[in-house]
Image: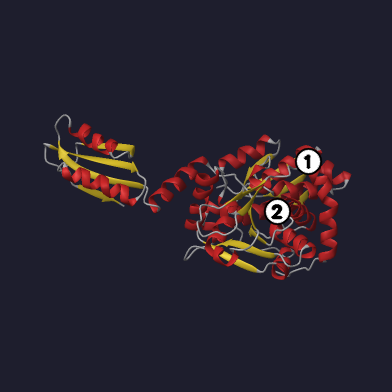
Amino acid sequence: MKTVRLDPARLLKKIKEEYPHIQKKVRHTPMIETSLGIPELKLPVHLKLENFQKTGSFKTRGAFARLRSLSLSEKKRGIISASAGNHAQGVALAAKWLGIQATLIMPENASLAKQEATRSYGAEVILKGKHFEGATEFALRLAETEHKTFIPPFDDERIIAGQGSLGIEILKDLPDVSALFVPIGGGGLIGGIATCLKLMKPKIKMIGVKVKPKTGGSAQSLPIADGIAVKQAGRLTAPLINRYVDEIVFVSEEEISSAILLLMERRKIVAEGAGAASVAGFLKVFPRFNNEQAVLLISGGNIDVTLIEKILEKGLVKEGRLFRFQIEVEDVPGVLATVTRIIADEKANILDIVHDRYSLQLPLNRTRIEFSLETKGPAHFQRIQQSLKKEGFVIRLIS
């Protein structure tokens, strides 16, 4: 891929030109302070909450800037774009504001919630391709056939400028900002913000956060962070990243899951995988940024409810607050009541019980009971084990 270098001064000028127009349509999202529950943290960090946008993501900024720049004839013909979800919603909403007919090509495995949200803004949704690249190839062919304008998700000067409006907002919210953590997918977000802030406040530290591919796979195999599951930055964005981003931190799917859980528990904030990546990156390197006025960009909050359930469960297991175990007991009245009483006396929460009388491995007078238990932590569960043992029950943990 041949890179193209945008003129930074020209890009900053465009960012400043777009900002007042974006202000009229796009929310100036809140910024809040938090310690993230880290006792060693000397200064609180600041969360810039782009998940509070109407579409649940920063993408509306760039989409509105790009669609606003179309000629009258281009607007009449309509536009086509490709996206796994957030860009699709941003384009659909911007098109609705400007009265433009929009067709969005989404991968076949795109989130149902994101598909429906995109349709709710009046756009046509077509599912094509297993991944983002396949959807993009189809969208480009369709745009050429139907003589419509293709709106790229990140590799476009106007889109980069629109995303860069966040840099101006962050400076307005926190003039003393000295470090900024931003998720990296295609690079439009960090490219625009980094150019804006490095030219306006050169000493700021720009930290990008990327998803670490699974062994033997690629970032596309990480459904938890589909918003940044892009193989590489664009021909326009790559040079901006190389020039203005000081450091890139790689985080795993598990680290992102922990960050999502942390945000929900500590601040009651719902972030998608890509949105929580900045928190995961900060948690990985925070000792080096302990005296900084750090901002963590929560870029989006569009996460499936079913995925939240899995993340919560895995997070509780990892922290030793969710346990599954079995006990084999005599199949007589009152035994289950005795076990549940012991658990209740220890102030634990029973999430689920499975009673199995019919296993061929069990004698006729025995039954197996499986419990899912929420506790305060490993020490609490150990006390429950000891209390059950005193009453003659032997438990077997289920991994």
Residue occupying the far top of the picture: 333
Q: Amino acid at mark 2?
A: Pro
Res. 53 image quadrant: top right
Q: Is residue 216 left or right of residue 121?
A: left
How far across and down, in percent of the image, does residue 56 sit?
Answer: 64, 43
Q: Residues within 10 Å of mark 2 (few under 14, many from 20)?
A: many
Q: Amino acid at mark 1?
A: Lys
Name the residue beneath numbered marker 2: 153
| Colour scheme employed for the rendering of this structure | secondary structure
How far across and down, in percent of the image, does residue 309 sit?
Answer: 46, 43
Is residue 226 visible in this depiction of the protein? no
| Spatial separation of the CA atoms under disc 1 and disc 2 | 19 Å
Q: Quadrant of the N terminus?
A: bottom right
How far across and down, in percent of the image, does residue 67 sit?
Answer: 80, 47
Work out whether residue 225 or residue 346 is closer to the camera in this orientation and state it: 346
Could you tell me which residue is drawn at 52 percent across and 45 percent down? 264
Tag 1's secondary structure? helix
How far across and down, in percent of the image, does residue 283 sit?
Answer: 53, 59
Q: Earlier in the sequence, mark 1 or mark 2?
A: 1
Work out whether residue 370 or residue 294 is closer to the camera in this orientation and state it: 294
Could you tell me which residue is drawn at 69 percent across and 59 percent down? 190
Work out whether residue 302 or residue 387 is closer to the camera in this orientation and state it: 387
Residue 25: mark in rendering = 1
Q: Nearer the viewer, mark 1 or mark 2?
A: 1
Q: Is residue 372 left or right of residue 196?
A: left
Does the CB distance between marks 1 and 2 fall below 8 Å? no
Tag 2's secondary structure? loop
Could you tell me which residue is drawn at 77 percent across and 68 percent down? 4
Residue 135: mark in rendering = none
